[in-house]
Image (cartoon, rainbow, N blue to C red):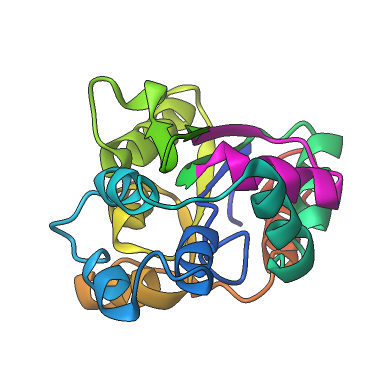
């Protein structure tokens, strides 16, 4: 019989917790970028944090406009709120690591009544655009940072379930014990032989943890 373990969870945000990349959606909706530029940003050679800094530097948006955009246009992936509350209720560590920014992540979490340990770029409205910094990336890039969060939890004796959708999630997915992937990440995992389940609904992960987490599984 498979032995139960203590689990933790790490997730990307844009296009993973949300149904569509919020940063991309904002840039396209207000005309601050185009589809070709955004598609090119998903190359394995491009650092997401560098693209975000460049793309939003000329985005003349207010905090109020961004918050309103989140409330009216940003959709959560099914089951996310239930999953976050499930983890909280059962003391399962759950972290979000993202190249996205706090100006849209904050309103999203508030909208859904969820509080999660998270790492986002810090953004402030400046003259002519938005200035973004990533204090948690002083010695590494975003892709490696996500992987380091998985490694940290594994060193603490836990198995880790990871959720992602983009190329910058690949390193973390390769280290995780269970992967739920969508979009570009799902294709990359298949190409590289990384076992991944297709991410459609976070409720699937709830059922997985019920069956495998040491304090929840039925023996």
Q: Is residue 83 left or right of residue 180?
A: right
Q: Within the magenta stretch, is there residue 116?
A: yes
Q: Quadrant of the N terminus?
A: bottom right
**Where does the image place residue 114, in percent across and percent down from the top left?**
80, 42
Residue 122 visible, this orientation? yes
**Where does the image place residue 110, in percent across and percent down from the top left?**
81, 43
Q: Is residue 153 left or right of residue 70?
A: left
Instruction: Please tell me which residue lies in front, 150 or 22.
Output: 22
Residue at x 39% of width, y 23% of height: 136
How many numbered marks appear? 0
Instruction: Kindly indicate the quadrant of the structure image that contains residue 148.
Output: top left
Vertical order, 162 against 190 (above or below): above
Residue 5 visible, this orientation? no
Residue at x 22% of width, y 77% of height: 191
**Residue that lies at the very extreme toward the front in this rendered image:** 127
**Where does the image place residue 14, in percent across and percent down from the top left?**
52, 58
Vertical order, 4 against 219 (above or below): above
**Residue that lies at the very extreme toward the left in this rendered image:** 45
Instruction: Kindly indicate the quadrant of the structure image that contains residue 190.
Output: bottom left
Instruction: Please tell me which residue lies in front, 7 or 132.
Output: 132
Q: Is residue 129 left or right of residue 73?
A: left
Residue at x 34% of width, y 40% of height: 147
Magenta highlight range: 101-121
Residue at x 48% of width, y 58% of height: 23
Vertical order, 138 against 219 (above or below): above
Instruction: Please tell me which residue lies in front, 70 or 177.
Output: 70
């Amino acid at each position: 019989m498979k032995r139960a373990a203590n689990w933790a969870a790490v997730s990307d945000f844009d296009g993973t917790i949300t149904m569509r990349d919020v940063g991309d959606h904002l840039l396209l909706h207000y005309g601050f970028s185009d589809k070709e530029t955004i598609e090119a940003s998903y190359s394995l050679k491009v650092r997401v944090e560098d693209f975000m800094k460049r793309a939003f530097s000329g985005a003349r948006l207010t905090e109020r406009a961004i918050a309103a955009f989140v409330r009216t246009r940003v959709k959560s992936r099914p089951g996310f709120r239930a999953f976050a509350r499930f983890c909280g209720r059962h003391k399962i560590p759950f972290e979000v690591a993202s190249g996205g920014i706090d100006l849209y992540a904050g309103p999203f979490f508030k909208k859904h009544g969820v509080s999660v340990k998270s790492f986002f770029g810090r953004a402030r409205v400046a003259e002519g655009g938005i200035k973004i910094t990533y204090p948690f990336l002083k010695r590494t890039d975003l892709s490696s940072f996500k992987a380091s969060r998985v490694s940290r939890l594994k060193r603490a004796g836990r198995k880790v379930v990871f959720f992602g959708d983009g190329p910058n999630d690949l390193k973390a997915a390769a280290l995780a014990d269970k992967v739920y992937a969508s979009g570009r990440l799902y294709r990359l995992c298949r190409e590289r032989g990384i076992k991944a389940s297709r991410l459609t609904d976070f409720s699937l992960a709830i059922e997985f943890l019920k069956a495998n987490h040491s304090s929840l599984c039925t023996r």
